[in-house]
Image (cartoon, grey):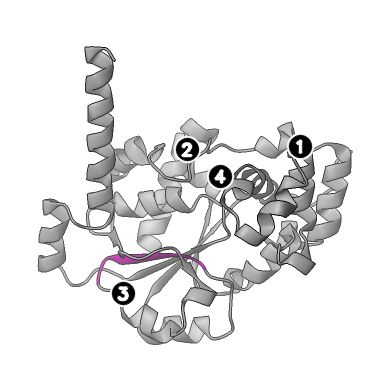
Amino acid sequence: MSGTGGEGGLRGRFAERWWTLDRFGLTPRKLTRRLRNREEPSILCVSIPKSGTHLLERALCLHPRLYRKLAPTLLNRRVKDKRALLRSLGPGQIAMGHLRFLPQYPELIAETGVRPIFLIRDPRDVVVSLAHYTPEHTREDLRALFASAPEFRERLRLMIVGDRARGLPSIGDRLQHFSGWLDTEAVVVRFEDLIGPSGGGDAAGQRAVLASIYRGIGLEVDDRLLGSISARLFSSVSPTFRQGSIGQWRQHFDPELERLFRDETGDHLGRYGYETAPPP
């Protein structure tokens, strides 16, 4: 390894480890704020898997007054006492989760004062990301199912239609399970607005959505801080980062897959705010 490459690799490893400390509020700057400031909101972030969860987490944790709770991504089956979970969140603390909507969530959120955020992404891009990611990271009992679909197009089809008998939800099921969050007081954030120019979006839209997120959860933000966060937001440090861009589905969906997708999702595409007209 050359000296330059070695130094670059060392700097990269240091940056990754420092970010880990910072995102969990363990750097000196954030530890000081945690001890001094007690008025920050507690935040619950919900997303469908592969919608850009780590991008939203980074956007929040780059704010000097916020940090992630030292806990794995929340799933309903892992959270037995949901009221206790929300009450456990301290000032400025963030919980990240793929929590399917349940009718008791709005009442629990109002009772505990937690500020919810719901991240959405074009469901067609969610399917593409799931097809790339899921086969290598799925449950042991589903690996044989993905092994039977070695071609990427077959995996796309599988992620669209699912396999309910084996517990693999279709994309329509996934959208249905989370759609209730759209009717709550949650701040709804679109991945396409958050990604910025590095992922096919635009800088002005990114800054606007960052401002709306912070103000939506009760934090003021100035132009200087917005500029600093925008400049550092897009990163490959995330353990599940693959490409992070908009409209990848157009490279992979043929007319048959598009029709299948629309049959499976029904009116959900429009409910989530994405186009509903069939292609010409």
Mark in front: 3 vs 1: 1
Name the residue type under label 1: Glu
Residue holding disc 2: 196
The residue lying at 77 percent from left, 67 percent from top is: 164
Closer to the N terminus: mark 1 or mark 4? 1
Label 3 belongs to which residue?
89
Disc 1 crowd rating (10 Å Cα; few below 14, some 14-19, many 20+) is: few
Classify the position of the N terminus by image quarter: top left
Observer-nearest of 192 and 12: 12
Asked if the residue under mark 3 is in contact with the one under mark 4, i.e. CB atoms within 8 Å, the reply is no
Image disc number at residue 192: 4
Whole-Å distance between the Cαs marked 1 and 4? 28 Å
The span picked out in magenta is 91-98
Classify 10 Å Cα crowding around label 3: few (below 14), some (14-19), many (20 and above).
some
Q: Which is more toward the observer, 148 or 74? A: 148
Residue 8, placed above or below residue 146? above
Residue at figure coordinates x 74%, y 49% from the top left: 275
Q: Position of residue 35 (x, y in %)?
A: 11, 67
Of the residues tagged 1 and 4, which is closer to the observer? 1
Q: Secondary structure at mark 2?
A: loop
Q: Secondary structure at mark 4?
A: helix
Q: Main secondary structure of the magenta part?
A: strand
Secondary structure beneath label 3: loop
Contact (Cβ within 8 Å) of mark 4 with mark 2:
no
Q: Which mark is residue 151?
A: 1
